[in-house]
Image (cartoon, rainbow, N blue to C red):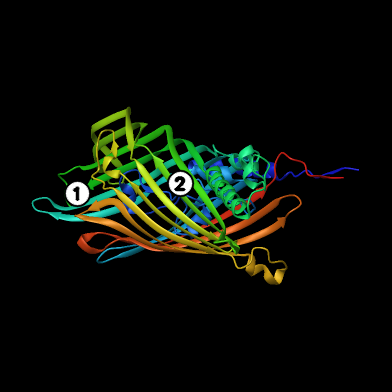
Amino acid sequence: MKIFFKSNFYYTVLTLFVLAAGNVIWAQTPTTSPYSRYGIGDLNGKGFAQGYAMAGSHIALQNDSLPMFFINTGNPASYSTNRLTTAELGVSYSRIQLSNASTKSVTNSASLGYVALAFPFKKWWGGSVGLIPYSAVGYKVSDQQSITNVGTVDFLYEGSGGINQVYFGNGVKPLYGLPSKFTRSNKYKQLVSKKKADQSLKTPQEYADDLRKANGILRRKKALQSLSLGVNASYLFGSIENSGRTIFPGSSFSFNTKSATIRRVGDLYLDYGVQQAFLIDSVKGRVLKEKVKIMWGATFAAKTDVKASVDSLSYNYFNSSTGFEVVKDTVVNVQDVKGTVTFPLSFGVGFAFKKGDRWLVSADYAMQNWSSFKAFNQTQGLKNSMRVSVGAQFVPNAKALGLNNYHKRMHYRAGVRYTQSAIELKNTQLVEYALSVGVGFPVGRNYILQNFSMVNIGVEIGQRGTTSNGLIQEQFLKATVGFTINDRWFVKPKFD
């Protein structure tokens, strides 16, 4: 008798994916930073909850052969290492304190962070599809100045919106199968045989040398087999609205002015990745109790002109006695002007070290050439940015059983990050420091149905900017809660 298990889990995940996608389209990752006024706003960090808790170190991270699997959108080469269908969904929260030399203010915001699916098409090929925020804009800044022969003038600046990214990525191992091909070859059989080609016996030294040579070639073949290449094909879309007002509160002879622009983008964007892993199970003939895995990775995105359009409106006005704006005359009113927004070249490299199932350490260096940024042929004086981050993960005992040992199966994470931002104001290039911590909670492991889940929590505390030179300093607390679910799709497990 055959018993078939059929899981409706993937129908639930697809439903959540569609509903969440609709929310992400209309809600950007939360930000209330005045510095989101520049460029295309505050950029969304790469990677999901796991990498977030490790200070964003993600470039070299990839899955092992056993669950728990995760999705690393920051390096599409990692998709080739997924062995189960993986769904990830996250929500984000931020608390930002803004301060200058005299005042402070605090804002709180929350939104849906990301939603993604990954599929193992073949042992050497995996893919992922998802919807994530690319950047976010959200600020409201006022400044009052006293100008000679004019009087008091209020300047108000506001911005909102952002850019979303829907992507489809693929990762492949182009040299997959080299080790098995080698072990089936005549050369391998001859090397591991105790006989020579003329059927005479090899001496013990000849046999040991040939066996060592065969194992060396096999290790190199395995290293080449692990090489993975990947690409994310994304469609960037969204709008950014910026407006500014000049108000003369003490004058009855001057009209106030307002200028507003709405920039909309919609175009294809590509980013690439490469990864490789080396497994060390022995040193000088001594078998290691815990295998060591060394990984490296790199990411790249070329300078890209993204199609865009802009609406511009500028007019003079005065406030009526009832408080309504009365337009005096329109200075500029243009609609749907076509152009491009230049996204800069970016590059990153990362290294990771994993010891058994317990220790994982990862480090990244990444840069973006923001000095080449243009929006409708206009530069914004941005500088090249740079990020350095280091993160670690510790699992006391991933195979521990029983409720009393649950804490041993939990994933403990931490990291530090230093970022030199693209913004330079008053001859001061803003820098950002952050410390992150996080925990992963395993939920409901089922080895028969290959169903695994985890709840990941990551918290980041840091600051950006300075109160010197009349600038604004941000002190922030950001949190991400991610839900990761692994399941075997499209296959019905059966028992005879």
Q: Residue furthest bottom?
A: 404
SS state under label 2: loop
Vertical position of residue 332 compared to residue 58: above or below: above
* Amino acid type for the residue under numbered disc 1: Phe
**Residue underneath mark 1:** 248
Q: Is residue 419 visible?
A: yes
Figure quadrant of residue 432: bottom left
Q: Position of residue 410 (x, y in %)?
A: 61, 65
Q: Position of residue 385 (x, y in %)?
A: 31, 50
For discs 2 and 1, the disc positioned in front in the rendered view: 2
Q: CA distance from mark 2 to mark 1?
A: 34 Å
SS state under label 1: loop
Q: Position of residue 283 (x, y in %)?
A: 54, 61
Q: Which residue is drawn at the image coordinates 68% and 63% (left, top)?
A: 399
**Residue underneath mark 2:** 28
Comparing 72 with 194, the one in front is 194
How many numbered discs? 2
* Amino acid type for the residue under numbered disc 2: Gln
Comparing 153 with 266, the one in front is 266
Q: Is residue 225 left or right of residue 297?
A: right
Classify the position of the C terminus by image quarter. Answer: top right
Q: Which residue is drawn at the image coordinates 35% and 43% (left, top)?
A: 40
Vertical position of residue 429 compared to residue 196: above or below: below
Q: Is residue 289 left or right of residue 391?
A: right
Classify the position of the N terminus by image quarter. Answer: top right
Comparing 3 with 122, the one in front is 122
Q: Residue furthest left?
A: 149
